[in-house]
Amino acid sequence: MNDRIQLTDEVADALAQGRPVVALESTIISHGMPYPRNVAMAREVEAIVRAQGAVPATIAVLGGVPRIGLSDDDLELLGSDPDVIKVSVRDLPYVVARGLHGATTVAATMRLASLAGVRVFVTGGLGGVHRGAQQSFDVSADLTELGSTSVAVVSAGVKSILDIGLTLETLETLGVPVLVNGADEFPSFYSRSSGFAAPMRVDGPVETAAVLRAKWSLGLPGGVVIANPIPTEDEIPADEIGVIIDRALGDADRLGVTGKDITPYLLGRIVEITGGASLTANIALVKNNASFGAAVAAAYAAG
Ligand code: PSU
Ligand code: MN
């Protein structure tokens, strides 16, 4: 085990005993949702994971130390301190060297989870190929990481702030299985539909865990995307949210927002335009993913 990475006793014990552990990211807390609902969400998601018999391991860098498993006070700090940096893989050395606080993206959380031996990770939405990437070259490092790091990521698909078609093509190129739980269409975060078929369908945690086991036991390293559609009662129809996303993208363009700031800007702007409705949907889908991800981790551990 890497001695620069700090695990809580609870997480270390669960891993040593082969009990299910679920990694959770922190960019969603610090840069994905407003305070204080972000902190409440983070605590509720941990409680959902526990209620399913798995151990939650929220991951972040605090005072320069990569941490696997956080306290309630740590979650409060991540949710409320405006100086917490958004940390993708390329940022890890800098925040560690300088002793800074960092909230980890999907890419950085996957890498730290993998270094700690955690195989299942739950979030809301993945990064991907941004619209207009043909010009901007803006492709999230989440995709690169999925291509090489052996962690399964449960999400509600990708938002149409991204180019969903190009994101799916890139995942295919990188050799990443894209599973959709219980549906024939790939979901687009707020909506169950996206216009793109599910590359591979699975029904339930046992079938999902079997794919993970098959991949890694074959000696095929790399991540797996597990797309878990938002529940019908919580979804915002694609045509309704589509107009709002287009407006947010237009605002970002006018303000010249680019690079690592674009995703947090768009998420915040969409919450503003929808008067909070998108936040309610976002929280509902993360909780749904936590429940499914804990069941996948349990099925994988039972394997
Ligand atoms: N999509 C969401 N909510 C989020 C993110 C993406 O719906 O909070 C965050 C995740 O942490 C993801 C990151 O890894 O944004 C991607 O950022 P970028 O596009 O800069 O790689
Ligand atoms: Mn980017």
Image (cartoon, helix red, strand yellow):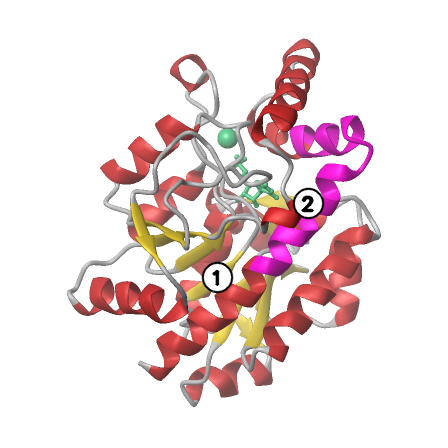
| Residue 223: quarter of image | bottom left
Residue bearing mark 1: 121
Image vertical order of residue 198 relative to residue 134, above or below: below
x and y, in percent, of residue 222 in the image: 29, 54
Q: What residue sits right under mark 2 in the picture?
A: 281
Would residue 2 be visible to someone looking at this image? no
- How far across and down, in percent of the image, does residue 51 sit? 63, 78
Q: Residue furthest left?
A: 218
| Distance from Cα at disc 2 to Cα at disc 1 | 20 Å
Q: Is residue 272 magenta?
A: yes
- Tell me the amino acid under the disc marked 2: Ala
Q: Under 8 Å from ligand 1: the CB of mark 1?
A: no
Q: Is residue 54 a member of the stretch shown in magenta?
A: no
Which region is colored magenta?
265-288
State which image quarter holds ligand 1.
top right
The reply to whether residue 49 is visible in this rendering is yes
> In front: mark 2 or mark 1?
2
Residue at 34% x, 64% y is 208
261, above or below 248, in the image? below
User: Quadrant where the N terminus lies?
Assistant: bottom left
Q: Nearer the viewer, residue 222 or 41?
A: 41
Left-right relation of 30 to 37: left
Q: Which mark is residue 56?
A: none
Residue 297, x across and y down, in percent? 44, 72
Could you tell whether 257 is left or right of 187 in the image? right
Helix, strand or loop under label 1: strand
